[in-house]
């Protein structure tokens, strides 16, 4: 892999531009999938934070998909050959809300490509920066971390432990994921990665004990937890994936507000942290 590093680093600075009409119908489908009956999803409504992920979607041809369901490597993202790909984290700043029913543009740029060797083998980290613009105004800035890694050992199913009582002032919600939820979220994001809906592939080819809950789905649910409990707008949202969640048992969302900030965490049935996030409120 060392000889290939210059080729990968050549992707730094590569850009793409994607346009979207921001149809309200897509947000209606998202709200239905999330059991959200409160969010306004009509033309002219403000797009909730993180829902930009339901738009500006890739349009890879069916013949252009890899065996795992992802678009074949190359193009905007570098052709890193490691088979496992994960959306590992993101940092967002919301300057103003995108408005449904009005065209918008997403500008993307590859900021960095780094190869490392860890306990589980070789890893590649790709940092992608996005700017979302509508009516010539900057609405959202986002920086994503995409991680590629070599195959690892099979993942054991988590043990289920009793959920401790909610501490005073904490927010809490329990999510029971199933194949229907994961399939609908995959459809909403035009994501054909088979670990989210193809149980034999997830188990046999990638070594998971169940279907994998999308990291972005968990992050969106955490942002929704904030919106359910606070009327203040989300100014920044940053998250980091720590461990996978599966459709084998409920998982738990926890919010710990502290003045103008909220510490968020999604914990699995074993009560171990699967995804952590930090929010600054307006």
Image: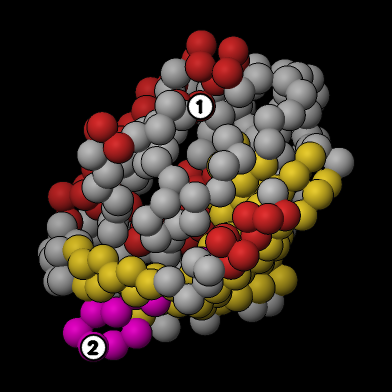
Instruction: Identify the residue at horizontal 66%, vertical 73% (top origin).
Output: 261
C-alpha gap between disc 1 and disc 2: 38 Å
In this picture, residue 193 sits left or right of residue 36: right
Residue at 30%, 65% (x, y): give it.
47
Q: Nearer the viewer, residue 184 or 222?
A: 184
Q: Is residue 132 magenta?
A: yes
* Residue 251 vertical position relative to residue 180 in the rendered view, above or below: below
Q: Is residue 145 visible?
A: no
Residue located farthest toward the bottom when viewing the structure as drawn: 136
Asked if 138 appears above or below 131 in the picture, the reply is below
Which residue is tagged 1? 195
Residue interval drawn in magenta: 128-138
* Residue 195 counted in the magenta span: no
Q: Secondary structure at mark 1?
A: helix
Whole-percent x, y for residue 203 in the image: 59, 15
Residue 234 spot, x, y in % from top left: 50, 72
> Against 230, is 249 above or below?
above
Judged from the image, the secondary structure of the residue bearing numbered disc 2 is: loop
Q: Is residue 57 left or right of residue 146?
A: left
Q: Which disc is residue 75 wearing? A: none
Residue found 24% across the figure and 47% down from its top: 59
Q: Residue furthest front?
A: 3
Query: Residue 36, position in %: x, y?
Result: 35, 45
Please name whichever residue, 177 or 90, is drawn nearer the observer in this view of the structure.
90
Q: Which residue is mark 2?
A: 136
């Amino acid at each position: 892999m060392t000889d290939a590093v210059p080729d990968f680093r050549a992707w730094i600075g590569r850009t793409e531009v994607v346009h979207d009409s921001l149809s309200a119908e897509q947000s209606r489908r998202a709200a239905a999938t999330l059991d959200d009956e409160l969010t306004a999803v009509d033309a002219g409504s403000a797009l909730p934070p993180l829902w930009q992920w339901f738009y500006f979607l890739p349009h890879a041809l069916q013949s252009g998909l890899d065996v795992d369901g992802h678009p074949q490597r190359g193009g905007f993202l570098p052709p890193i050959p490691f088979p496992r790909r994960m959306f590992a984290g993101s940092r967002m700043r919301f300057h103003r809300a995108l408005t449904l029913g009005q065209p918008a543009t997403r500008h993307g740029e590859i900021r960095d490509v780094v190869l490392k060797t860890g306990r589980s083998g070789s890893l590649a980290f790709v940092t992608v920066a996005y700017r979302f613009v509508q009516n010539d105004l900057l609405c959202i800035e986002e920086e994503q971390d995409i991680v590629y890694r070599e195959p690892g050992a099979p993942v054991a199913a988590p043990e289920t432990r009793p959920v401790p009582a909610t501490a005073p002032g904490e927010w809490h919600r329990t999510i029971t994921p199933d194949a229907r939820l994961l399939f609908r979220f995959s459809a909403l994001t035009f994501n054909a990665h088979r670990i989210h809906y193809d149980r034999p592939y997830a188990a046999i080819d990638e070594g998971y004990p169940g279907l994998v809950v999308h990291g972005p789905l968990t992050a969106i649910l955490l942002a929704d937890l904030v919106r359910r409990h606070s009327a203040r707008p989300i100014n920044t949202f940053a998250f980091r994936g720590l461990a996978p969640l599966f459709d084998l048992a409920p998982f738990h969302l926890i919010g710990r507000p502290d003045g103008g900030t909220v510490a968020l965490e999604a914990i699995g049935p074993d009560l171990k942290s699967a995804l952590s996030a930090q929010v600054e409120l307006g």
